[in-house]
Image: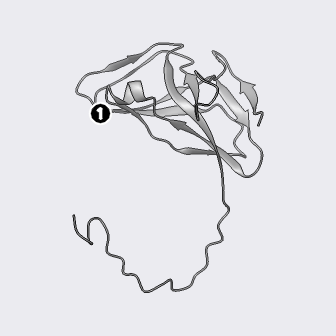
Amino acid sequence: MKIKLIKFMGHQCPNRAHYNDSGADCFAAQGTIIPAHSVVKVPTGVGVELPDGYDIVVHCKSGLSSKGIWAANAPVDAGYKGEIHAILYNTTDKDFIINAGDKIGQFVVRPVIYAEFVDELGNEREANGFGSTGK
């Protein structure tokens, strides 16, 4: 599948390190500091034209995750044509510096199932959760 890029200032094309990687590395279009225990939107410099039936997510990079920098993994819908931002959370006690051109996440394109939600009583399962069936 080929995805058209919409280029903004400071863009760098997403790319895969290996042909069979599920995600394509995306890059910071500008430098920023993510303060300790804070969330920052980091621009990637690109948008995409997705066909209906797909979305794109900025997933965490394992190298950043291991340093305490996590991506929010919020979906970007096919109808959105603006610049994609990585929503990054610094879980550490120290500020984290992102430089322009740093790898900040991975674009993963996913198929979408358009569910129809109906107002009907479901099965007999109760609403218990969060460990209700044991450890």
In which quadrant of the rendered view does residue 125 lie?
Answer: bottom left
Q: Looking at the picture, how far across and down is residue 107, in whole percent?
A: 59, 33
| x, y percent for residue 84 | 61, 33
Label 1: few (<14), some or many (≥20) within 10 Å?
some
Q: Nearer the viewer, residue 56 or 98?
A: 56
| Residue 33 point in image, percent of width and height | 39, 19
Q: Residue at x 29, y 65 (%)?
A: 130
The residue labelled by disc 1 is 91
Where the N terminus falls, by quadrant? top right
Residue 135 percent coordinates (x, y)? 21, 63
Q: Is residue 124 above or below residue 76?
A: below
Rendered position, 23 above or below 18: below
- Nearest the viewer among 81 and 91 is 91
Residue 65, compared with residue 54, is above or below; it is above
Q: Quadrant of residue 85?
A: top right
Q: Where on the picture, by quarter, is residue 98?
A: top left
- Which residue corresponds to the image point at 31% horizontal and 30% vertical from the top-left? 68
Q: Residue at x 75, y 33 (%)?
A: 3
Residue 106 lies left or right of residue 35; in this view the side is: right
* Front residue of 15 and 26: 15
Horizontal arrangement in the rendering, residue 36 relative to residue 105 (left or right): left
Secondary structure beneath label 1: loop
Colouring rule applied to residues: one colour
User: In the image, what residue type sits under mark 1?
Assistant: Thr
Q: How many marks?
A: 1
Q: Residue at x 43, y 86 (%)?
A: 124
Left of 123 or right of it: where is 80? right
